[in-house]
């Protein structure tokens, strides 16, 4: 398992027209088209960041495969807090892009065509998150922002989750728990390909997640929550 983060603000600040073109040239064709089809500058930057992180993940895998001779050596047992990448890191590390191609599951979930890795992307606020694993993976990041916790929880959360929210000692703690639970629901929906709508009302509190998955340890940036899950070894 590897987890990568990139600050979109840094990407926007670094991208004048010539720099943007140079970074765009480091993406595969599909990701380039996604960037160019985005209308809003922040969305375009997020798409560019996602494409760069996919390239980094794929190239990191290729280097380890070359060095160790087996794809399974790609940090299979690691659960890192997350690798915070910078634009300068990516510029120096990514030269010629890998010609990545993709296939899509019946629910539209994307997969690498030639590389035996699973990936999941998420964007919220200033950050793009990319998780890759040798097992099916789902990832989500959420920026903390004021929310009508009780109104939303009554509609979308399980009874147990609502009780956990009620037990919080402060509104700040309650808001964070609300978004932590939402991140878990989003991550699991991405892992299965069914989306978050399929798991609303399902209990994702501590120790209550589906038994066929495990959660990676990830420390999100300040002001954010994040969740990354993957299939257990004995369930694949």
Image: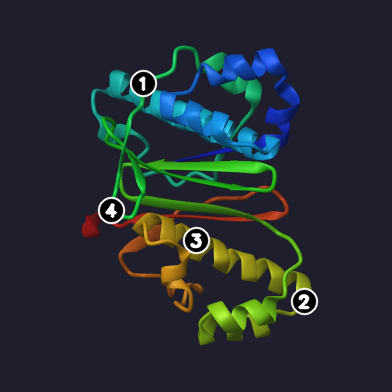
Element marked by disc 1: loop
Q: Which label sits on residue 170?
A: 2
Q: Position of residue 40 (x, y in %)?
A: 67, 38
Question: Residue beneath label 1, please?
Answer: 99
Between disc 2 and disc 3, the foreground one is 3
Q: Is residue 210 left or right of residue 10?
A: left
- Kindly check if marks 2 and 3 are in contact, taking CB atoms under 8 A apart as contact: no
Between disc 1 and disc 2, the foreground one is 1
From mark 1 to mark 4, how far is it between C-alphas? 23 Å
Image vertical order of residue 93 relative to residue 140, above or below:
above
Q: Which comes before the other along the chain, label 2 or label 3? A: 2
Looking at this view, is 114 or 36 the one in front? 36
Q: Residues within 10 Å of mark 3 (few under 14, many from 20)?
A: many
Question: Residue beneath label 3, please?
Answer: 186
Q: Which comes before the other along the chain, label 1 or label 3? A: 1
Image vertical order of residue 65 relative to residue 207, above or below:
above
**Which image quadrant: the C terminus?**
bottom left
Between disc 4 and disc 3, the foreground one is 4
């Amino acid at each position: 398992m590897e987890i990568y983060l990139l600050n979109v603000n840094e990407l926007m600040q670094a991208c004048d027209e010539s720099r943007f073109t140079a970074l765009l040239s480091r993406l595969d064709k599909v990701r380039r088209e996604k960037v160019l089809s985005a209308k809003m500058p922040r969305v375009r930057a997020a798409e560019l960041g996602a494409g760069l992180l996919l390239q980094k993940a794929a190239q990191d895998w290729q280097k380890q495969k070359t060095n160790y001779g087996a794809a399974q050596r790609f940090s299979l047992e690691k659960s890192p807090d997350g690798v915070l990448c910078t634009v300068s890191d990516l510029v120096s590390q990514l030269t010629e892009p890998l010609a990545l191609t993709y296939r899509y599951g019946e629910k539209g979930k994307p997969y690498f065509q030639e590389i035996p890795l699973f990936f999941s992307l998420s964007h919220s606020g200033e950050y793009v998150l990319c998780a890759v694993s040798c097992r099916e993976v789902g990832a989500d990041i959420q920026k903390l922002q004021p929310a009508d916790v009780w109104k939303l929880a009554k509609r979308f959360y399980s009874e147990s989750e609502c009780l956990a929210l009620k037990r919080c000692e402060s509104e700040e703690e309650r808001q964070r728990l609300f978004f932590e639970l939402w991140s878990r629901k989003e991550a699991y929906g991405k892992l299965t390909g069914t989306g978050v709508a399929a798991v609303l009302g399902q209990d994702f509190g501590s120790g209550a997640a589906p038994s066929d998955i495990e959660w990676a340890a990830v420390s999100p940036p300040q002001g954010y929550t994040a969740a990354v899950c993957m299939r257990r070894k004995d369930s694949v």
